[in-house]
Image: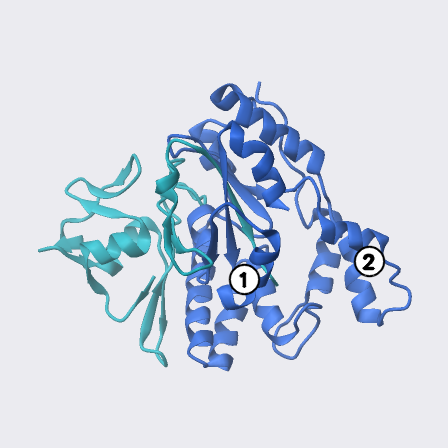
Amino acid sequence: MWQEVRSELHPHGLEIVTVALDVEGAAVAREFIDAAKAEHPSLIDQGHVLDKLFGVVNVPNSVWIDENGMIVRPAEPAHPPRSPIMEQLRAMDTSTLPPDLADVLNMAKKIRHEPDTYMSALRDWVARGADSPYALSPEEVVTRSHPRPLTVAEAAAHFELGQHLHRAGAIEAAQAQFREAHRLQPDNWTYKRQAWNFVSPVVQGPTDVYESSWAEDVRKIGAENYYPALEMEPRS
Amino acid sequence: MLLESLSVDRASFAQGTGWELKPEGACKGEICVPLPAEAVHNGTVDVAAVAARLGMPLVHDEGAGLWSLGPESAPTGRALTTAMAPELELPDVGGNPFKLSSLLGQKVLLIAWATW
């Protein structure tokens, strides 16, 4: 998906760097990266450091960085021009599927997807740089980055411990740390989905281990809010 | 950052947290937060003292014998303390180390994704 954007915009000065937030690392991410035939750096983030460093709370998310290493847009939903997964999903007849899977897929169909808004802003920034109305000032970048009260920083500390314990094979101890991370930062989908996926792959359904599930949490906030609306109004 | 002890050297602290400890205080990008005198002694960082000043939580796991030091929350109350991109060093899919700063001079679209 992103390789297409790279082919279009690399001649105009944009490089793409993809980062897979996966505790299990290249072992699970490699097949997707190989299939994408990516010409850009494709990195592996086993520690979810992008959450800590940039305030990423869901995927796909993007951060725009200018030639001088200044962030001009903090982490926000990233919408590629074509999303084969969403296209397949929209075309899918879910009526014959098991109810829990159908429920998840029907909700996923309602997720907000704004490729036109996203891509026209991206193209404008690549063409015009600092003169683009979509390039934010350093102050706006900090202000628009994800809120981080002490509880959110604590969630990060618990999540890091959880990953360490998970890798060391202390699964139950890891789950206790993941639960604490979820409680402290309920709007962080990367913490939740990573942990849910270990016990309920793909569907991320209800289990004895975690209090909530993907379907339950998405229903609570409304599928259309799973990715917040882009704030791509041109800067005045 | 995971720690076995609450005393670490300056370089490890900077590597793990992105905060450089300088005479003027703890610094990230153009932001410097003054520190109490006892926070750094002979190049050794009193992690609890710096953590308290920057709003970094310390979570202790007795079973594992580890401390987990969370990111700063005090300077701005946001995920970013500064708009200067932090150094990001991660392996690529082939296991080779890659630094984000190697792309200075180009615009970069950094994309977070996942298989789950």
Q: Are marks 1 and 2 on the same chain?
A: yes
Subunit of label 1: A
Tell me the quadrant of the picture where the C terminus of chain A can be found: top right
Q: Residue at x 44, y 62 (%)?
A: A47
Task: Categorize mark 1 by other alpha carbons within 10 Å: few (<14), some (14-19), many (20+).
Answer: some
Residue indicated by mark 2? A106
Q: Is residue A59 left or right of residue B26?
A: right
Of pointers 1 and 2, the one earlier in the residue sequence = 1
Looking at the image, residue A193 lies above or below residue B83: below
Dot 2, crowdedness within 10 Å: few (<14), some or many (≥20)? some
Q: Determine the colour of chain A.
A: blue
Residue A77: percent from left, percent from top = 61, 44
Q: Which residue corresponds to the image point at 69% horizontal and 60% vertical from the top-left?
A: A217
* Amino acid under disc 2: Asn
Give above or below for B61 relative to B100: below
* Tag in front: 1 or 2: 1
The residue sitting at 50% across, 75% down in the picture is A176
- B34 and A40: which is toward the camera: A40
The residue sitting at the right extreme is A95
Q: Is residue A110 visible?
A: no
Asked which quadrant contains residue B41, the reply is bottom left
Which hue belongs to chain B? cyan
Height in image: A232 above or below A30? above
- Image quadrant of residue B22? top left
Which numbered disc covers residue A30?
Answer: 1
